[in-house]
Image (cartoon, helix red, strand yellow):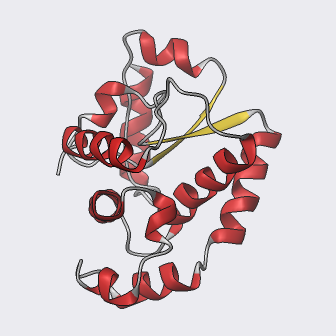
Amino acid sequence: MSGAVFKTVCEIVRAILGGFDSHTPPPNLRDELRGMKQWISLNMTPQIGPRAATKLLEKFGSAENVFHARRHELESLKLKPESIESILKREFHEKAEEELSKVREIGGDVLNLDDGGYPFLLREIADPPITLYVKGDWQTCFDAPCIAIVGSRRCSTYGENASQMLARD
């Protein structure tokens, strides 16, 4: 599924549920922070990558609604058992809260796929990440021509050396 499909579905869901978009201020900061914790928690859930997360978000309309889903609804999406258990137990909610606090302490921010600040072109790739950690003048960066190197968190020594060489050049 592409980011474009997800974006279209979310617009419909927001219209039906009366949600807000990036141009409408959130009802209050507490709701916004709770929602961000849900996105981070979903991103931390084992065996839930961009593809599975997009399926969940399209079915339930928001990260928060994913964590209110019933077991049979999650099983119908053919998720791995450990993912279903993690979602039902809300296993990563506390860790997501800690993560968000640490990010904010260093002056960073977290963008989610449903956020108006999320880079438009990145949203259009086949499997966009559902959260992005940013710091500094990121909006200017996204508005200017840029290059990104995306890779594995646990890359090989060769992969690390090759990416450094490409970035340097």
Seen from the viewer's position, the closer of residues 156 and 139 is 139
- Image location of residue 126, percent across then percent down: 20, 45
Residue drawn at the location 30% of the way across and 65% of the way down: 52
Residue drawn at the location 47% of the way across and 56% of the way down: 153
- Image location of residue 57, percent across then percent down: 35, 58
Q: Quadrant of residue 7?
A: top left
> Vertically, is 48 above or below 80?
above
Seen from the viewer's position, the closer of residues 70 and 51 is 70
- Drawn side of residue 36 relative to residue 33, left or right: left
Residue drawn at the location 56% of the way across and 64% of the way down: 41
- Image location of residue 62, percent across then percent down: 43, 56
- Drawn side of residue 69 relative to residue 95, left or right: left
> Vertically, is 37 above or below 56?
above
- Image location of residue 46, percent across then percent down: 45, 75
Seen from the viewer's position, the closer of residues 6 and 21 is 21
Seen from the viewer's position, the closer of residues 21 and 137 is 21
- Drawn side of residue 50 relative to residue 35, left or right: left
> Vertically, is 66 above or below 149?
below
